[in-house]
Amino acid sequence: MAGDRRAVLIAGPTASGKSAHALTLARQSGAPIINADSMQVYSVLRVLTARPGPGDLVAAQHMLYGYVDPSVRFSTGQWAADVGRLLAGELAKAETVIFAGGTGLYFEALTKGFASVPEVPDEVVARIDRQVAALDREGRGRLLAARDPAMARRIREPDPQRVTRALAVLEATGKSLAEYQQADQPALLQGFEIEKYVIDPGREISNERIARRFKAMLEEGAVEEVRDLLARNLDPSLPAMKAIGVREIALWLEGKMSAGEVVERTIIATRQYAKRQRTWFRNRMGDWTWISG
C-alpha cells in the first residue's frame, strides 16, 4: 500500500554536510544509505570524490558507492535501473531507505521518473564531447540551438555535460532527447512516503569547507588516487576522468603546475560546481525542505 515504505532524500551541493546528515539518520533508524551522486559510483577516487570512509561504512550500510569501473560511461538510466533492482530485491522489505548525494537528475528519477533512452555508443559520446569541449558557454548554446532547438529550450545552462548528452542522443538515435523526456516514466519511489531535504549551509560556509576539505584530501591520498587512475590510460572524455581535481593534479604530476596552483584552481572549480548545484536545486527543488548545514 502507498505510504507503507518511507524514503528520505537528502540532497545538497558539494561539502554541504549532506553525508553527515544521512549518516546520523541511518544510525538512528538502521536504514541503508543509497548513493545519489554520479561521481561516487566509481571505484576510484574515493578520497577525491569524498566517498564515505571506512568508519562510515562500519557505522551504516552504504549501497551503490564505488561499484562502477572508471572505464564505464555510466548514465542516470543505468543508476535508475540499479536502484529499481535494489528496491524490488535486496531492499524489498526495508521500511526506510535513505538517498544522499548531489546529482539532481538522480533525485528527479526517484521522484518524477526518468526517460528511457537507448544506450549511446561510447565513440559517439567521445566524438561529441571533443567538439563541445572546444567551445565556451555561448558556443555551446549556439551549437545546441542549431542542432536540437527543442533541447536548447529545455536547458537553461548549456554546460558541457548536458550539451554533450543531448547531441549524442540526437546523433545516435535520430530523435531529440526532449522526445524521450516527454514520455511518461514512473517515478522510482512511486508508492513511498517521501521526505525531501536540501542541505545548504550557504555560500560562505560552503566555500570555507571546500577549501579545508580539499587540503585534507591531498594529505589523505588524492594524489596517489589520480596517479593510479592515469596509469590506466583511459579516454579523457570518460566521466571519471572529469572529476574535479583530476586534471589539476595530473598537470602537477607532469610538472606543468605547482602544488599551490593545484590547490587554488581545484578549490575555485569546486566552488563553481557548488554554485551550479545550488542554482539547479533552487530551480528544480524549490518545494523541498531546505536546511542550513
Image (cartoon, rainbow, N blue to C red):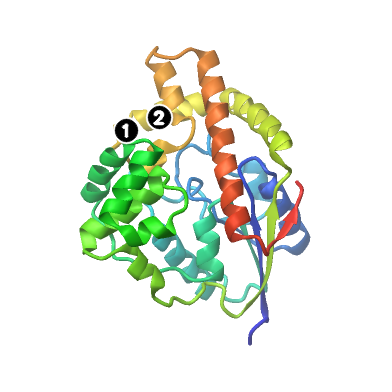
- Badge count: 2
Is residue 74 shown left or right of residue 244? Answer: left
Residue underneath mark 1: 232
- Mark 2: few/some/many CA within 10 Å (<14, 14-19, 20+): few
Check disc 2 and report its element: helix, strand or loop.
helix
Residue 140, image x, y percentages: 35, 43
Q: Residue at x 34, y 53 (%)?
A: 165
Residue 122, image x, y percentages: 25, 50
Check disc 1 and report its element: helix, strand or loop.
loop
Residue 162, image x, y percentages: 40, 51
In the depicted structure, whether residue 31 falls above or below residue 72: below
Examine the image and state in which quarter residue 148 appears.
bottom left
Q: Quick one: 150 or 87, which is closer to the camera?
A: 150
Mark 2 residue type: Asp
Residue underneath mark 2: 228
In contact (CB < 8 Å): disc 1 and disc 2: yes
- Could you tell me if residue 29 is visible in this image? yes
Q: Residue at x 60, y 54 (%)?
A: 281
Q: Locate the N terminus and report the quarter of the image it occupies.
A: bottom right
Q: Quick one: 162 or 244, which is closer to the camera?
A: 162
State the CA–CA distance, disc 1 to disc 2: 7 Å
Q: Quick one: 276 or 225, which is closer to the camera?
A: 276
